[in-house]
Every structure is written in C-alpha cells, then in structure tokens.
Image: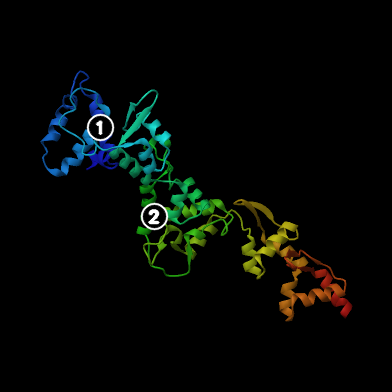
C-alpha cells in the first residue's frame, strides 16, 4: 500500500489532488477530459465493481472543478447536482458567508459565481464540497479542543508543543477554511502510544496533570520527564483504558528520580523545607519574601518561587524558632505564647496577616535565652 499512501491517507483530498495533477499534466491540446487523462482514465473505467464508484465520483468532482473543455466524459458526480447557496453552506460550516465566497473566488474550493441582476452575484457551492470542508474542520482542533481531549492545562500543553510531541500544522499545510491548528490524528496517536506502554499500578502514583511547576521549579527537569513519558520510557499505570491523558498515573518513584537527577543544585523549594521541618509551605515562602530565611528567587510560571540552600536553613534555625513549633513542644497554643511574649516585651517576627488573625510568628532564640536567664 505504500505507493498509494499519499492518495488514500487524506481522503478524498489526496486522491483528488493526484487526479488534478494528471489533468493538468495531460495533453494541452486535448479537448475532452478522457483524452486529457489518457490511459489512466480508460483503465479506471474498466473497473465495473461498485467499490470503485467512490473513486469515479472523486474523478468527476475534479473534472467539474478543473476542466473547461467541451466533453467532460462519461463520469458524473452523484452529488454534483446538489448545490447550496453560500449563505446556507456557511451556516452549516459555522463560518461567515463572506469567507466562503472569498474561498470560491480564489478557487480554493469548488463553487460557482453567477450574476443575477445588476451588480449582484450569487455564489453556490456543491454539497459534497461542504461535506469535505466540514470533515476537514472536524479533523483539525483548536488549542482549547486539544487541551480538553488530553485533559491537561495550558502550561502542560505548552510543554508538549515545545517538545514537539504535539505539532502545530502550518497554515500552508491546512485545508481551506480550517481554523484548527492541531491535527486530531497526531494528538490521538500520542495518547495511544503512551497508553500502549501502560502497566498495572504497583505503588504510589502521580497523575500526569499533576506534573506542573507546582511540583518542581526546575522547568528543564519537568520537560525531560514529560518527554520520557511521551517516548514511552516511563510507563503509565492504568486500570481504565478510557481515561484522559491528564488522568494517566505514573510511579511516583520514577517521577521523583527524574526530577532529582536533573537538579543542578541541592537547593530546596518551600515545599521541600516544609516537608523537612513540619512548617507550612506558605509560611516558608513568606519568610523568604521578608528576607528572614535566606533564599534565591526563581521564576515559577506567572509568579515567583524561592530556593533555599541547606546552609541557609541551618542559619535560619539557629536564629529563629516558629512560635507554633514551640507551642506544640510545650503542649500549649500559639495564642497563649504570643500573649506571654507580649507581657514580657518580647517581639515576634515574620507574621503574615490572614483575615482577622496572623500566622507564621517567629521568635528569636536570643530572646528566648534572655527569658530563660531572667527566670533563673
């Protein structure tokens, strides 16, 4: 089938383009379509089986559009007698009539323009052409439609585009009157490839839609992880084959191994620090913003994030104690300790206002030492 792949893979456009090429390359002095197409046409007409009617119908459509001689031949398109006004054709396609008429004028699609009255033109389009255009428009998806099919967000979709696993089709390669930029077949094939390498779930898993910059600030590592998944090097774990790509699950240990291996330093994110210490990640980020906890600022999608070196965390812990941590160790509440500190004139630092309350209070270890010495 390889020699005819280009003719059949994009039906009927591939085949019709081939017939158009034969028609234009034929004898220019020929006055009939059969003569212009020559032996190829004669061989086609020898096939009497009904299975060949769709091919003959496609040839008839090309002759109707492209041939201007006196004798079109014995073929007649079964749908060529059915014409739709441009307004109705445009309504069925969901586009403007002006756009459809312009495509007919440029000869991008089949159609006829006739003059009715003074200065008025009427444009009609064959029904088969409307059906072909509608099929093309269904095959090409917009970015939003592609994201919905995959079940991913815009950031992940951008990664898939940057990696080249979801390719945008150039305008010059799209059929006429098509708005979508992504070929549905290529997107479906990507999901099929990942699904084909799936195994059974054996441990803690991470969803594909959770592989975002919220999990790591290292964009390079994240893109590598997604690329390995798309290549099938990291297998999905599926119990239900019908789920969207965003709900595909992957072994958490495999995910973290790739993310760790791509790190260029031992810096910790706010989430990492929170897991190590038991503090709130939101409080850690706030202390970094205030400069109390040493860190470096890095881009994080539309916002910003902070990375903390182990040495910086050690310095912070040698200077400050979270009041909430101290309260837990003493079996009391943060509110009680804050009241005691206020009565003794001890200032707290790094608090963040949340509604009518404050969180993330820090007390200096030197102030606690002074309090203990006074008590002694």
Task: State which tag comes first along the sequence, 2 or 1.
Answer: 1
Please report the residue visible at 71 percent of the width from the left and 60 percent of the height from the top.
Answer: 286
Looking at this view, is 332 or 367 the one in front?
332
Q: Is residue 278 left or right of residue 140?
A: right
Q: Position of residue 217 (x, y in %)?
A: 59, 55
Q: Quadrant of the C terminus?
A: bottom right
Q: Position of residue 289 (x, y in %)?
A: 72, 57
Q: Which residue is mark 1?
A: 62
Looking at this view, is 150 or 133 the one in front?
133
- Mark 2 lies on a secondary structure that is helix
Q: Tag count in the figure? A: 2
Please report the residue visible at 13 percent of the width from the left and 33 percent of the height from the top.
Answer: 43
Report, in whole angstroms, how far the alpha carbon at label 2 lies from the one at label 1. Answer: 36 Å
Q: Which residue is mark 2?
A: 191
Q: Residues within 10 Å of mark 1 (few under 14, many from 20)?
A: many
- Name above or below for residue 158 compared with residue 369: above
Please report the residue visible at 23 percent of the width from the left and 28 percent of the height from the top.
Answer: 22
- Mark 1 lies on a secondary structure that is helix
Q: Is residue 290 left or right of residue 372?
A: left
Q: Position of residue 258 (x, y in %)?
A: 50, 58
Q: Quadrant of the N terminus?
A: top left
- Name above or below for residue 245 compared with residue 331: above
The type of colouring in the image is: rainbow
Marking on residue 70: none
- Name above or below for residue 233 compared with residue 318: above
Looking at this view, is 254 or 101 the one in front?
101
Please report the residue visible at 62 percent of the width from the left and 68 percent of the height from the top.
Answer: 275
Q: Position of residue 42 (x, y in %)?
A: 13, 31
Where residue 366 sits, quadrant-wise, is: bottom right
Q: Is residue 261 left or right of residue 237?
A: right
Q: Residues within 10 Å of mark 2 (few under 14, many from 20)?
A: some
Q: Residue furthest top?
A: 29
């Amino acid at each position: 089938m390889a020699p005819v792949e280009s003719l059949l893979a994009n039906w009927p456009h591939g085949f019709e383009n081939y017939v158009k090429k034969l028609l234009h390359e034929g004898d220019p002095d020929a006055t009939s379509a059969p003569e212009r197409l020559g032996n190829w046409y004669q061989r086609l007409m020898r096939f009497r089986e009904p299975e060949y009617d769709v091919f003959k119908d496609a040839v008839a459509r090309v002759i109707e559009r492209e041939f201007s001689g006196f004798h079109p031949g014995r073929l007649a398109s079964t749908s060529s007698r059915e014409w739709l006004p441009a307004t109705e054709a445009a309504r069925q396609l969901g586009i403007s009539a002006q756009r459809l008429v312009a495509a007919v004028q440029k000869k991008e699609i089949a159609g006829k323009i006739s003059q009715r009255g003074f200065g008025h033109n009427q444009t009609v389009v064959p029904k088969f052409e409307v059906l072909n255009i509608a099929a093309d428009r269904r095959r090409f998806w917009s970015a939003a439609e592609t994201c919905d099919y995959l079940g991913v967000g815009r950031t992940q979709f951008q990664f898939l585009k940057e990696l080249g696993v979801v390719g945008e089709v150039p305008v010059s390669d799209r059929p006429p009157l098509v708005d979508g930029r992504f070929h549905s077949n290529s997107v479906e094939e990507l999901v099929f490839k990942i699904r084909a390498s799936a195994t059974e779930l054996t441990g803690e898993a991470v969803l594909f839609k959770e592989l975002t910059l919220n999990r790591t600030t290292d964009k390079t590592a994240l893109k590598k992880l997604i690329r390995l998944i798309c290549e099938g090097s990291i297998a999905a774990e599926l119990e239900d084959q019908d789920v969207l790509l965003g709900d595909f699950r992957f072994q958490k240990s495999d995910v973290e191994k790739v993310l760790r291996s791509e790190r260029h330093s031992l810096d910790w994110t706010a989430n990492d620090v929170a897991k190590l210490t038991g503090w709130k990640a939101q409080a850690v980020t706030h202390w970094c913003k205030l400069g109390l906890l040493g860190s470096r600022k890095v881009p994080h999608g539309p916002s910003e994030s902070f990375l903390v070196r182990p040495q910086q965390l050690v310095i912070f812990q040698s200077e400050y104690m979270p009041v909430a941590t101290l309260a837990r160790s003493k079996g009391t509440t943060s509110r009680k300790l804050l009241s005691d500190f206020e009565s003794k004139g001890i200032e707290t630092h790094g608090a963040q206002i949340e509604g009518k309350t404050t969180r993330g209070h820090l007390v200096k270890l030197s102030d606690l030492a002074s309090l203990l010495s006074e008590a002694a």
